Image: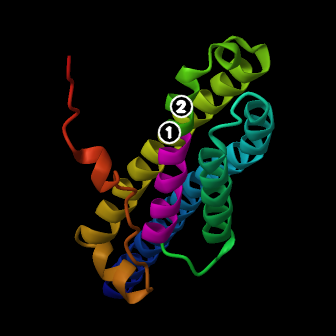
């Protein structure tokens, strides 16, 4: 009779452990999804700010219409990839990096327009976009941290046995674009 109690107690411990591991995996997966959603919130904010920026800049930059057109096209492309549920993380990353690059180009071109640089609307929008870009980067770091934790959890023994059998898979990390990995050239 005592052997039966020992076996039942052992089975109960294994069941409790399996439940704890499964719940931990679900918590980790939900944290990664929440972090990815935080990135989406910041991207939406950026998408909403860009038309206001373009309208503010239009009156000043009559000679730089091509830059504004590129910015609008980059925003449209990024939104299309963002709204495509089948888009990979790499495709989303590339579209967002293209938009970021176009924004940098716009801000560089505005250096030639002192009246624009002095415009309160432009300065406020530039601050908002800069703040949004910083929040996007923070959201990506948060996502990468949660992704790291989740990936470690599903790769370590003995959790990996349960994770693999239940179909949990690794998440991809956000990576810097190739152009952003190059050394900065400072010329005087």
Residue drawn at point x = 40 percent, y = 77 percent: 169
Secondary structure that dominates the magenta span: helix
Q: Count every numbered label the image shows and give the total.
A: 2
| Left or right, residue 35 beside residue 160 | right
| Left or right, residue 29 beside residue 124 | left
Residue drawn at point x = 41 percent, y = 70 percent: 17
Mark 1–mark 2 Cα distance, whole angstroms, equals: 6 Å
**In the drawing, what numbered circle is on residue 105?**
1
| Left or right, residue 95 beside residue 80 | left
- What is the crowding at mark 2: few (fewer than 14 residues within 10 Å), some, or many (at least 20)? few
Query: Is residue 98 inside the magenta stretch?
Result: yes
User: Dividing the picture into quarters, in which one does residue 85 lie?
Assistant: bottom right
Percent position of residue 83, x then y: 69, 70
152 or 16: nearer the viewer: 152
| Left or right, residue 127 beside residue 150 | right
In this rendering, the answer to whether 3 lies above or below 22 is below
Q: Which residues are magenta?
A: 89-103
In this rendering, the answer to whether 134 lies above or below 50 is above
170 or 65: nearer the viewer: 65
Are the two marked residues, 1 and 2, in contact with CB atoms closer than 8 angstroms?
A: yes
Q: Nearer the viewer, mark 1 or mark 2?
A: 2
Question: Mark 1 falls on what kind of element?
Answer: helix
Percent position of residue 174, x then y: 40, 56
Residue drawn at point x = 35 percent, y = 78 percent: 10
26 or 104: nearer the viewer: 104
Q: Which residue is mark 2?
A: 109
Percent position of residue 12, x then y: 44, 77
């Amino acid at each position: 009779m005592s052997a039966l109690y020992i076996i039942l107690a052992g089975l109960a411990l294994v069941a409790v452990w399996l439940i704890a591991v499964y719940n931990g995996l679900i918590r980790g997966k939900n944290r990664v999804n929440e972090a990815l959603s935080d990135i989406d919130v910041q991207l939406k904010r950026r998408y909403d700010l860009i038309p206001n920026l373009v309208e503010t800049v239009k009156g000043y930059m009559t000679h730089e219409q091509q830059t504004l057109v590129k910015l609008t096209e980059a925003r449209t492309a990024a939104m299309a990839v963002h709204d495509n549920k089948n888009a990979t993380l790499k495709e989303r990353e590339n579209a967002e990096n293209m938009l970021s690059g176009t924004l940098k180009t716009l801000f560089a071109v505005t250096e030639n327009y002192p009246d624009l640089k002095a415009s309160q609307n432009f300065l406020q929008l530039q601050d908002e976009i800069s703040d949004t870009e910083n929040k996007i980067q923070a959201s990506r770091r948060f996502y990468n941290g949660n992704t790291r934790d989740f990936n470690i959890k599903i790769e370590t023994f003995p959790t990996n046995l349960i994770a693999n059998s239940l179909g949990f898979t690794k998440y991809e990390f956000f990576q810097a674009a190739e152009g952003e990995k190059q050394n900065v050239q400072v010329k005087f």
